[in-house]
Amino acid sequence: MIYPSIDKITNKIGSKFLLVNVISKRVAEMEEFNHYQMEEKEYKAKKDIGKALEEVANDLINLK
């Protein structure tokens, strides 16, 4: 099973299309600036895409 669940995340974001845009921009920021919202040991994912999804699931990325 994928963590975090896409269903839970789309409830926070609103649409899958917006989710893709937010995650792709966040991953680009992670790669360019090497900046993460949580400590490395707090992430369950090893790849930046999973880490960005976890940040959205934990309400660390706001769209407002």
Image (cartoon, grey):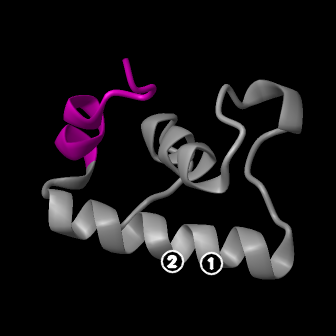
Residue drawn at point x = 67 percent, y = 48 percent = 47
Q: Are marks 1 and 2 in contact (CB under 8 Å)?
A: yes
* 19 up-or-down from 2: above or below: below
Query: In the visual, does 45 lie left or right of 22?
Result: right
Q: Position of residue 6 (x, y in %)?
A: 27, 36
Residue drawn at point x = 46 percent, y = 46 percent = 56
Residue drawn at point x = 48 percent, y = 46 percent = 53
**In the rendered view of the protein, which quadrant contains the C terminus?**
bottom left
Query: In the visual, does 57 lie left or right of 6?
Result: right
Query: In the visual, does 38 lie left or right of 51?
Result: right
Q: Amino acid at mark 2?
A: Lys
In three-dimensional space, the C-alpha distance between marks 1 and 2, rounded to whole angstroms, equals 5 Å
| Residue 28, numbered circle | 1
**In the rendered view of the protein, which quadrant contains the N terminus?**
top left
Magenta residues? 1-12
Q: Amino acid at mark 1?
A: Ala
Residue drawn at point x = 85 percent, y = 68 percent = 34
Image quadrant of residue 2?
A: top left
Crowding at dot 1, Cα within 10 Å, few <14 / some 14-19 / many 20+, comes out as: few
Instruction: Depth check: give the residue in front, 19 or 46.
Output: 46
SS class of the residue under badge 1? Answer: helix
Instruction: Depth check: give the residue in front, 54 or 64.
Output: 54
Instruction: Depth check: give the residue in front, 32 or 38.
Output: 32
| Residue 25, numbered circle | 2
Crowding at dot 2, Cα within 10 Å, few <14 / some 14-19 / many 20+, comes out as: few
SS class of the residue under badge 2? Answer: helix
Let me know if residue 64 appears in the view.
no
Residue 47: within the magenta? no
| Residue 51, numbered circle | none
